[in-house]
Image (cartoon, grey):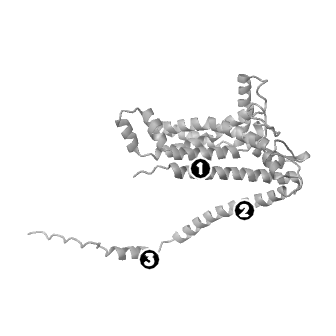
Amino acid sequence: MEQAQSRPLPAGKSPSGPPARVADRLRRSPRVGEGAIQAFLFLSAALSIVITLGIVVVLVRESRLFFTNPEVSVLEFLTGTKWQPHISQFGLLPLLSSTLVTSTIAMIVALPLGIGVAIYLSEYASRRARSILKPTLEVLAGIPTVVFGYFALTFMTPLLRSVFGRDTVEIYNMASAGIVIGILILPLISSMCEDALSAVPRSLREAGLAMGSTRLETAVQIVVPAAFSGIMAAFIVGISRAIGETMVVALAAGAGPNFTLNPFRGAETMTGHIVRISSGDLSYDSIDYNSIFAIALALFFMTLTLNIISQAIVRRYREKYE
């Protein structure tokens, strides 16, 4: 006895009915808790925006009190080479130069090491090696920054003085602070660079190996250029983190504004100055107190500019693959 053959369904039909009706039923079906979850996510995003706007409002309001003071000149604040509030000299360049010196040293340390770690993890490391190295980096990222500050003061500074001479390297210096900040931001740089390298399609690696390239040549000449936008984003985020670091520079870099580019000398950074002044006995609404917010506003614009540059670089050099 012949078995009855099933008749094919007409085009656009399904066992449950036309696709439009199925989609309509799915759209109208109740989803328990989905509305609450969506509202929570929206409130979280809105709260982050409100907090950012609140920070900007406070910085602008308090900074306005500083810049409207008759003893303060905006031009002197941006171009002056002396920061001595007790004699009404408010030049930002000593604090800015030490901040840039420590941040530059930190990136010289963190960027090559971070890219090297990222290349190893994405191209060479076995599963066992990744299971050991990744948690180690996460532990390094979880160490409090005050511990890094004491590490710079008690280990890195004596090491630099033994290498370059006690007369050359001061006890409080920007070099030791910059090196330790580089170690501090190394997990951030390596993690972001590894994500960028892992996002490169495997077909590019296979094509390079098929052309006779070694694994190192494939990684350096194919994978790294393809992930350039992500690596640059990691660089910008890392330098923003280095500029905003506080405890390391407060403990190891120095406690007095000093307009110098010599990394072996002590100099106070912008964040270090904010910590030192805010921890003292300052009366509210005094010119010294208001100067803290002016420095913080300058830091905010520096990091904002770096983030804008990062977004522009990512849009300009982002690679899209099918």
Residue 11 x %, y %? 26, 72
Amino acid type indicated by mark 2: Gly
Q: Relative to residue 253, is residue 118 drawn left or right? A: left
Q: Secondary structure at mark 1?
A: helix
- Image quarter where the N terminus lies is bottom left
Secondary structure under the numbered disc 3 in the rendered image: helix
In three-dimensional space, the C-alpha distance between marks 1 and 2, rounded to whole angstroms, equals: 24 Å
Q: Nearer the viewer, mark 2 or mark 3?
A: 2
Q: Total number of numbered labels? A: 3
Q: Earlier in the sequence, mark 1 or mark 2?
A: 2
How far apart are labels 3 and 1 at the CA level? Answer: 42 Å
The kind of residue tagged 1 is Ser
The reply, left or right, for residue 225 in relation to residue 291 is: left
Which residue, as the protein is rendered here, is positioned at the far right? 87
Identified at 57% across, 35% down, the residue is: 112
Residue kind at label 3, given as amino acid type? Arg
User: Mark 3 or mark 1: which comes first in sequence?
Assistant: 3
Foreground pick, 79 / 140: 79
Near mark 3 (Cα within 10 A), the count class, few <14, some 14-19 or many ≥20, is few
Compared to 96, does 38 lie above or below?
A: below
Residue that mark 1 sits on: 310
Q: Are marks 1 and 2 in contact (CB under 8 Å)?
A: no
One can see residue 71 in this view: yes
Q: Residues within 10 Å of mark 1 (few under 14, many from 20)?
A: many
Q: Which disc number belongs to residue 131?
A: none
Which mark's residue is nearer the viewer, 1 or 2?
1
Residue 96, position as x, y percentages in the image: 75, 43
Return the residue at label 2: 54
Picture quadrant of residue 143 = top right
Question: On the rendered structure, is 85 left or right of 52?
Answer: right
**Which residue in the structure is indicated by mark 3?**
28
